[in-house]
Image (cartoon, rainbow, N blue to C red):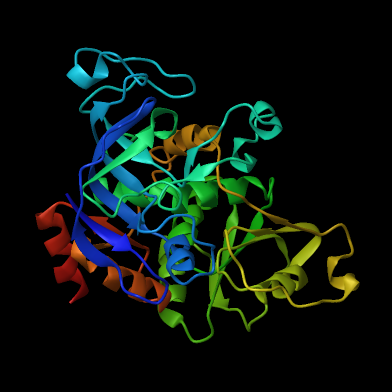
Amino acid sequence: MRAMLFERTGEPLRLADVPIPEPRAGQVRIKVEACGVCRTDLHIIDGELPPHKRPLILGHQIVGVVDKAGPEADGDVAGGAEASTFAGTAALKVGDRVGVPWLGWTDGTCRYCRSGRENLCDHARFTGYDIDGGFAEYAVADHRFAFPIPGGYPVPQAAPLLCAGLIGWRSLSMTGDAERLGLYGYGAAAHIITQVARYQGRRVFAFTRPGDTTSQGFAREMGAEWAGDTATAAPEPLDAAIIFAPAGDLVPLALKAVAKGGAVVCGGIHMSDIPSFPYEDLWGEREIRSVANLTRQDGREFLALAPEVPVHTEVELFRLEEAGEALDRLRSGRVRGAAVIALDTAEAQGGRHLRE
């Protein structure tokens, strides 16, 4: 099969022909149709996250069709005869369209897993990091972490739901019932969560890089009632803020923007160092917290909610061999919404046409 391989920091991804993976016990194999491109992929190739595997196939927003199962995933699914119910997930069968997120495996026995916090599992393994991901024609996944994709979503539009959507949803949940919500960094996650927040009756205030009027306009299109840059004060105090940009210097800015009792939620897996700030900015029962990974419950909740909103994802499509270009555009902030690798040639060509 064709796959894009990450081999060394500072070197471009390489298109290679590699063996089609075989699912082991408890795994399913997925014929990949699309895979979202995430800032976490940039953190990996730029060396900001320590390497766990080389060579590595990146990609953790996978959408595809189950085509084979390992021996303990389902005795019948490999033949396509009937569905089987797995612990913690819905029935799957050959031919089902599923999505695979960042959290790819947990031990199920540690104190975090036993207390409903599997996102903090000490032995967790991650898709596109510890486990080869979706920048390839096939991928294998633990059957417990393969979510049925809600009907009505075109394949490329479903891919960003698997990380941008899920991490955004978990971050939003950390803000409680905050009405005035600030979003710092307006990309894939923010454009999804704006739609969810508006559906819930919240008011959204979007903050972008100074001078990025394009993203500010995009935010207003998605439902933000105000959009400006991070050098501009919000028009009124915020009840909570979510920081999606990996910039630690945004934390003190967001703290100053939230009212007493407000929360600042850091939604990324990596962030530059947070500069010092006076205690006065934190006082008043403000809080700072991070979001780590996701749980299967997050997946069930969000994928059920997305069609109700309904969430519409804006995507730019790329062919598999253009994964490096997609990453470069994401790094420079030149993606409207989310970048998605489409394994369907016609879809990918259409996306290329839209970008030219």
229 vs 146, left or right, is: right
* Between 26 and 262, the one nearer to me in the picture: 26
* Between 204 and 37, the one nearer to me in the picture: 37
Q: How many marks?
A: 0
Quarter of the picture containing the C terminus is bottom left
Question: Residue 51, image x and y in percent?
Answer: 49, 61
The quadrant where residue 222 appears: bottom left
Q: Is residue 94 above or below residue 257?
A: above
245 vs 24, left or right, is: right
Question: Residue 112, image x and y in percent?
Answer: 68, 34
Q: Is residue 103 above or below residue 187?
A: above
> Farthest residue toward the bottom?
211
Please say whether residue 127 is visible from this viewpoint: yes
274 vs 67, left or right, is: right
Q: Is residue 245 above or below residue 196?
A: below
Identify the residue at horizontal 54%, vertical 35% (top origin): 106
344 vs 156, left or right, is: left
Question: Residue 324, image x and y in percent?
Answer: 29, 70
Question: Residue 276, image x and y in percent?
Answer: 80, 77
Identify the residue at horizontal 40%, vertical 77% (top origin): 10
Identify the residue at horizontal 69%, vertical 46% (top origin): 176
Identify the residue at horizontal 53%, vertical 80% (top origin): 209
Please say whether residue 154 is visible from this viewpoint: no
Q: Is residue 339 above or below residue 304?
A: below
